[in-house]
Image (cartoon, helix red, strand yellow):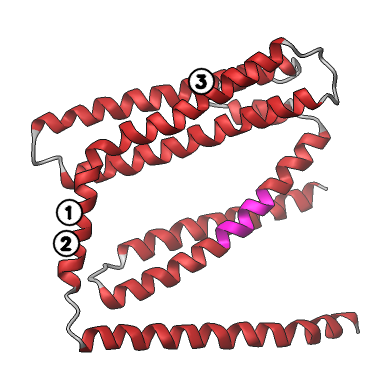
Amino acid sequence: MNEKSENRKALPKFTLSLLGSLLVGGVIGFAVGLSRAMGLDTAALAEGLSAALAAVTPWGIPVTSALTLGSCLVLYRSAAKKFAAWDGGDEDETSESIDTALSWVLLLSAVQLLFNLFFLSAFCIYWMDRDIRALALVGVFLLSCGFVVFAQQKAVDLTRRMNPEKRGSVYDTKFQKKWMDSCDESERRQVGQACCRAYMVSSRFCLGLWLALAILSMVFEVSILPTLVLLLVWGVMQVTYSLECIRLGKRN
């Protein structure tokens, strides 16, 4: 009885969401058709976007590295200064502020790694065959990646100094497993909640990105490859999550 009641409550909202999606899709389809009828030069638009990306590619890694890694340096120094004055209290507000600062260091360094990979890919597309001097960007890429790893190492080392029971080095290929094994039940529960949240957000993002690619394919000459890669990543995430739930269910 409860299952039927829950379904009846959720059905109207689901129906409205479906109708809203159909309405938005109809509006977008009409706009695409109208743009084609008006003779929108999508080839020129795509060429302009490519030219803009090619222009910013050589400066992408240096500029983003200065912003993100510079912020990491400021945050780490602030955390290290607070740690030096910390009295070691478990529930002290200082320890919480240190953990927050170090978490931001890890986040910004991870984002910078994504920037590095993106601009390196753009370099291979737009600059590889243009100028041999552009190969210097590869050196900038490696240098930035080195600073990313160093920032993460300093953050992890300071966390281990605050929590001596923690184990693992960022240079160890099994770092994540060792770090997880050294966490207590509360920390593992927090990691589990964060992973569940990341899974739900990623699933919605993949769905939205698939829709965006479907719409773009109506306007630009987009091959099936981006959609295939997206669905492959989405599928790996879905299958891994489901299989892990099955494995954990059997173990319990």
- In the rendered image, residue 118 lying in the magenta stretch gets the answer no
Write down the region rendered in magenta: 195-203
Apparent side of residue 79 relative to residue 223 in the rendered image (left or right)? right
Q: Residue at x 71, y 41 (%)?
A: 191
Q: Give residue 2's quadrant in the image.
A: bottom right
Quarter of the image for the N terminus: give it: bottom right
Residue named by callout 1: 51
The image shows residue 31 at horizontal and vertical percentages of: 34, 84
Report how many numbered discs are placed on residues in the image: 3
Residue named by callout 3: 171
Which structural element holds mark 2?
Answer: helix
Q: Is residue 168 visible?
A: no
Distance, label 1 to label 2, CA atoms, is 6 Å
Q: Is residue 247 visible?
A: yes
What residue type is disc 2 on? Answer: Glu
Which structural element holds mark 1?
Answer: helix
Judge by depth and name the residue closer to the eye, 179 or 37: 37
Residue named by callout 2: 47
The image shows residue 44 at horizontal and vertical percentages of: 15, 68
